[in-house]
Image: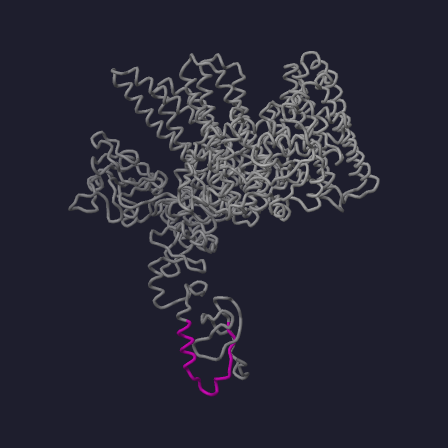
Amino acid sequence: MATPLTGLQHRDVGGGGVAVMAASGGGAVSQIDPSSSNKSSKKQSSPVHIFLYFHKAIRSELDALHRSAVYFATNSHVEIEPLLKRYQFLRSIYKHHCNAEDEVIFPALDIRVKNVARTYSLEHEGESVIFDQLFTLLDSDMQNKESFRRELASCTGALQTSISQHMSKEEEQVIPLLVEKFSFEEQASLVWQFLCSIPVNMMAEFLPWLSASVSSDERNEMRSCLCRVIPEEKLLQQIIFTWMDGVNGFKKRKKLEDDVTYQCSPMAEGNCACSSSRFKKRESLFRSSDSHLDHPIDEILHWHKAIKKELADIAEAARSIQSSGDFSDLSAFNKRLQFIAEVCIFHSIAEDKVIFPAVDAELSFAQEHAEEESEFEKFRCLIENIENDGANSSSSEFCSKLCSHADHIMTIIDNHFKNEELQVLPLAHKHFSPKKQRELLYQSLCVMPLRLIECVLPWLVGSLTEEEAKSFLRNMRMAAPASDTALVTLFSGWACKGRPRETCLSSSATGCCPAKAFLEENDGSGPPFCPCNPPTKRPDSTSRKESNGFGNPGALAIQVKQSCCVPGLGMNSNNLVAGSTKSLRSLSFGPSSPSLSSSLFNWETGISLIDEGTGRPIDTIFKFHKAIRKDLEFLDVESGKLNESNESFLHQFNGRFRLLWGLYRAHSNAEDDIVFPALESKETLHNVSHSYTLDHKQEEKLFEDISTSLFELCELHDKSSSVSSNCNGNLRSYSELATKVQGMCKSIRVTLDQHILREELELWPLFDRHFSVEEQDKLVGRIIGTTGAEVLQSMLPWVTSVLTQEEQNTMMDTWKQATKNTMFTEWLNEWWEGSSSSAEASPSESDKNFSQGSDSHEALHPNDYTFKPGWKDIFRMNQNELESEIRKVSRDPTLDPRRKAYLIQNLMTSRWIAAQQKLPQERKDDMLDSEGLHECSPSFRDAEKQIFGCEHYKRNCKLRAACCQKLFTCRFCHDNVSDHTMDRKATTEMMCMNCLKVQPIGPVCSTPSCNGLSMAKYYCSYCKFFDDERTVYHCPFCNLCRLGKGLGIDFFHCMTCNYCLGIKLVDHKCREKGLETNCPICCDFLFTSSAAVRALPCGHFMHSACFQAYACTHYICPICSKSMGDMSVYFGMLDALMASEVLPEEYRNRCQDILCNDCDKKGSAPFHWLYHKCGSCGSYNTRVIKVDSVAECSN
């Protein structure tokens, strides 16, 4: 492939490209108004904006194709043949468009901006898979089935969605980067190389289709843009604009040349030494020479001979390297190999698409062609390995492999060619006239792109005798249609460059100079100019060409001296870089298209597919992809049943869709907020995730559209069920909308499938290469730390349902490792049956030391020497054993004071609790009856307004304490009047204060008279907590209800600190289990405190109210003595004070050794009774560690 930044001579329009964002979104590209503002004019001046027209034409074709597919699905009398032709045309056009981008645009962009192009190349392959699936459906036996038409419409809609989103992303990211990073000349060069990388036969279809797909003004602007892109060579412009006009517009070309929108500067005048007759005379000459060409198809032998000769030369070069041991020229050897590999591949494509179908539809050498391509790829990889290993390589071993591989390829191709010559050529001789044979050969040549033909024709003609070369050119000119006159002239000139300078094959073959005759025929203004000889006067553009890299003076002189010198493309023919043929085989649209696991996806990165058995922490996040795929499959498959108008199924489908949407949104938000920023923070990974962020936005829009359509579908179903009139109309509308939803579900499945596949191919391996296990653990902790309890409770069963038991255990082990400092395992064991028994037997370290203060009974491990207050054990103990256990707990230094007090209190009151549980039922009933009148009466937070609740909470119910079976409004009300604490999580019953009915605890009253009265706005089923005033959420890692909107909204849970922190405190100083301690001021336990907590810069915590009071008289942390804030103003005041203060004579020169509490450095400071400034950080937060009463201070 040619270097994308080859300097070309283009029309000077002034000004470079401007970084203007292209239109985004899934809609069509807005028209570019020529009369718009100056900013818009600059946007038009960027050559790469021609891609917007390409995208618009593709969108228009996709939209028309989808409408036709929907019409086909809803009308059984419509035939599929016209639709099939449109599918084939779109596939061909789009595949070559993608291949040109992969070959030219993306490699050039990757040089300037890393980590952008590979994603879009992967998307091209994903779209190729969608095309394959579509054509598999078209070729299947389903066409006679009723569901075939709807399935075809759905697949077409999915294809439209995928390609439209891809192009929108290119317009939002790729095109602005091209405008920003490339000059005008470089952009023009890229566009020109893009056009020259599309096969000639496709250009003849692509440009007329493109021209017909845009408005008249846009067509004029596109012509103007192409005129700035195409080098200033009239022959090249004639070819491109002939293609653009199409066959019917060929006769109008002369008139259109006067159009200012695409007219280029005229060529200089000159005289031609090759005088000859006019074009009609040449045609007569062609016809008269026809008798000498009985079997033109035999020219295939010329190709075989040239290819085998080139391979023999390569094999000889390999043996030369082996004998000399010199690997210095391997890059040139590799380029030569790449060239012949590309020639062989295009030769194979030409045979598969042109020759073999015409000769015999059942004839195929696809297997041989695929084997040859594979062997060339292995050969190229071997050479790259030699280049990469360098001095570390074993010369003899590599040389041996090089030679044996070259000989092996020669043997394979030689056998293949012999079989073709024996099977194909006799059939062609028998069934085809010479004219048809010439046409097949010409069509085969046009399968190649211009950039390759420019190299191939001189190479091929150079291997022929003069008579064979003349015959080759004669056959080519006779086979070409009249509209290809300019193209054949160009081909002939290129072919002549393969012969000695004094020989003009074109003149000999046709009796004239084709370039001169062509220009004479097509230019009536002034004397004709022929590039066979230098002009009498050239514009100064020649010097610009030389200075811009079009060619050095020597090379230009050689071109001028050649007997037939047509213009080149302006691309360095030697720069056929490795990988330029990486997707050519897919152009044949055969069954062996590249798989998603092929080396194609390792372009430029060297990343291979990941072994899921490696067990890295980040793998847990990608396990969600498996669950997403399963639900996407459900939506796709089951959406076909929506047409049955089953109410129960409709509600079930709607619920499953909303579950997937919610969980996918949580997953994508975690990637956007945590995973992608982590990737972008690595210097080598900048820009790697931006494309995926755009994907999330587009996918969210798809989910919204499906949600809207499902809502409308439910409304239509209700109308159809309740209204008898116009029932048929409602049913038809329902059926059409159901078909639309089915297509949208297919689209979301295809889009998300490809999105997560690309993530696994491109992003997943990056974590293994750039992140340690500890960093991955932190990422997992941050992700689940922003996920609320309700989402986790839905997500975990959803994910684990598609995993094997081993995968489930691995995932849960990773989660528990990331949450080892938290109460996550305890929360998990309270509700999830899927938690392993090993987890229950081995609680986390945090569980051993603390479990929500007074709200939990058992937290320590059974094997721990510290007693765990289980009631069954307590009942079996005598008084001495209880006292012994109390002393053990009291002496245990590892227990938190709050936890220690809780255990001792429970042990001391255990006898009373046991006695209460052993009371006869009758006595308990008597107690309940005597106290029932008071307990069963409602309590009020505001008696005047009759608002239920207590001084602590507003709620509509009372709770029955499990410990004493009494009713209290909240646990604080219970603890205030009882000699024991209430375990609210053990609560199973409540009393509605409206109807005074005792019932199982729940969010609403179950009594019919209350009509579903809500007990509070917020109800937590884990904590048995009600609150009707504040915004509350349950943190599964604290296993507590906390004030706030929720995790991921305004709070997140830090897995190291084990506390919920404000979302703005993501970057804070972590201190392991920093809040599992008492407030240093009031000694209240911080973790379960309902008061606001403040984090200090040193990482310690205290109540906000305590901080306000303490900071009035202190500025250092009471725990570590570091400054609690920015004290620069205060320290400045002390500086002024110290400067104005005069010490007594005997103390002035003395110094003191100090330790700074802020920077932890030791130093010396002038003697003072109160203030000592740190020499390192300037802080006065120091303490004296030594006073020298004799030595004088040097400072």
When the figure is inspected, residue 277 is found, relative to residue 618, above or below; the finding is above
Task: Report x, y in % for residue 912.
Answer: 34, 45
Q: Nearer the viewer, residue 522 or 711?
A: 522
Q: Is residue 1110 left or right of residue 1152?
A: left
Residue sticking out furthest to the right: 323
When the figure is inspected, residue 16 is found, relative to residue 308, above or below; the finding is below
Q: How many marks?
A: 0
> In which image quadrant can residue 1077 be found?
bottom left
Task: Report x, y in % for residue 560.
Answer: 69, 40
Q: Which residues are magenta?
A: 1131-1154
Which residue lies at the image location 16% right of the left edge and 45% below the top edge?
945
Q: Nearer the viewer, residue 1089 or 798?
A: 798
Q: Is residue 1102 left or right of residue 480?
A: left
Residue sticking out furthest to the front: 526
Report whether residue 936 is seen. yes
Whether residue 357 is in magenta: the answer is no
Q: Quadrant of the N terminus?
A: top right
Task: Report x, y in % for residue 178.
Answer: 52, 43
The colour mode here is one colour
Which residue lies at the image location 28% right of the left edge and 50% below the top edge?
976
> In which image quadrant can residue 375 be found?
top right
Residue sticking out furthest to the left: 944
Task: Report x, y in % for residue 771.
Answer: 57, 46
Q: Nearer the viewer, residue 289 or 196?
A: 289
When the figure is inspected, residue 897 is found, relative to residue 1022, above or below; the finding is below
Report whether residue 610 is seen. no
When the figure is inspected, residue 742 is found, relative to residue 398, above or below; the finding is above
Whether residue 1140 is in magenta: the answer is yes
